[in-house]
Amino acid sequence: MNAPQDQPRIIPIRSAYELPEPVVRDELVRTGRGTAMGELLRRYWHPVGLASDAADTPRQIRVLGEDLILFRAGNGEVGLLHPRCAHRGTSLLYGKVEDDGIRCCYHGWKFGPGGQCLDQPCEPDGGSRVGRMLQPAYPVAERYGLVWAYMGPPDRQPVLPRFEPFENLEAGEFLEADDQSIGGGGPVIVDCNWFQHYENVVDPWHVMVLHGSFSGVQFTDAMLRAPTIRFDATPRGVKVTSLRTLDDGSIFRRVTEACVPTWRVVPNPRVGRYARVESLGFVLPIDDTHFRIYTVARVRTPGELTGFRSRQGGKLWSELSADEHRRFPGDYEAQKSQGDITWHSHENLATSDRGIVLLRRLLAQQVKAVAEGGDPVGVGFDPGDDLVCFEAGNFHDPRPVDAGG
């Protein structure tokens, strides 16, 4: 007997009702102290502010899930201290910066940039524990217009790296630093997990779809041509080599790298000139659901670095209306809509995701190395071995070469 005509047809589907509970790969995304990834990330130096952020007004910052106080004493030294005063716990955010340190507002205990107690004015003779009492602090250094911090085990502190693209400037070039999350495609403080963005560095296939269609055409014609892509593991990360054939038969070769711990080594997608990579982005996990990107670049004119920001529908992200965000999604919309932390158990990775597989595998290996008491890749302890070089850049090959060329 035929089914009544008013009954809905039953067709095979995968019912959302049957979806299992999501599972997150915590070892890759959680950054707090004591977590697997948090302990890995704490073995490296991270930028925690622009050099100008360290000033005579205390600034509260959040890094890897920890709240800290950043300041610059009158003598020019930068301090990064735990916020709770070692005396009674009052926040040093309300302290007063002096020539040689910061003074707590409650009872006046003063601490130097390295955390040493310098004065206890309410105690007899200025305090018996002056010089012995220590406020918890982290080592800091300044380089390339940024303040860097090391937040890991004191006995495993590596040297602060120098980066070859910034050490060998061409005539007329100088360095600019930016804290506005260039490359994030959204707000300055991006409100989703840092790893969802970091993986995007080794996902070249989204350029044609997201940036070449949905976002409006954001880059040059050459970037929108279908590439031949090769993924390679490197000693420090994952390298993506994309080859695009130009009209004259020559090859546009673009090399991008994601390097441990959180470095974006991404050449300018507008391809104004063929050259080695001119900027580096440093993804800073603020906590598990927020991050920002610090960027340093070689430039020739002041303000040139801000021009690296992507446009969607001809507008900057902050200029789009709610409807335009829906019609012109970019990196932020694609990554944030995965959730504050994506559901790894619900993914179905394909061949185009090889770069992501390599990156996750590398980081999982480094997490294991640290957990077993070893040192992760890329950390160095010899001051003479602090220079880091990259293969990344936009290059023009007159004759066709294979993907490894």
Image: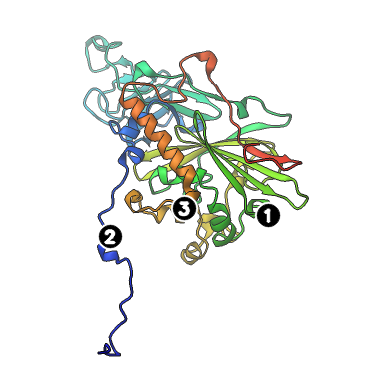
Q: In percent of the image, x 32 and y 50: which residue is there?
A: 345
Give the total number of marks visible in the rendering: 3
Rendered location of residue 392, percent (x, y): 60, 36
The mark that comes first in sequence, 2 or 1, is 2
Q: In percent of the image, x 50 and y 28: which residue is there?
A: 235
Instruction: Please state if 45 lies on the left or on the right of 305 as rendered.
Output: left
Rendered location of residue 193, percent (x, y): 38, 45
Mark 3 to mark 2: distance in Å? 26 Å
The mark that comes first in sequence, 3 or 2, is 2
Mark 2 to mark 1: distance in Å? 41 Å
Task: Please name the residue that numbered disc 2 is placed on.
Answer: 19
Q: Are marks 2 and 1 in contact (CB under 8 Å)?
A: no
Residue 67 visible in the snapshot: no
Residue 32 visible in the snapshot: yes
Q: Which mark is residue 332?
A: 3
Rendered location of residue 232, percent (x, y): 53, 37
**Residue closest to the eye, 311 or 260:** 260
Q: Quadrant of residue 31?
A: top left
Q: Which mark is residue 209?
A: none
The mark that comes first in sequence, 1 or 3, is 1
* Amino acid type, residue under disc 2 in the picture: Leu
Q: Are marks 3 and 2 in contact (CB under 8 Å)?
A: no
Task: Please name the residue that numbered disc 1 is placed on.
Answer: 221
Camera-nearest label, 3 or 2 = 2
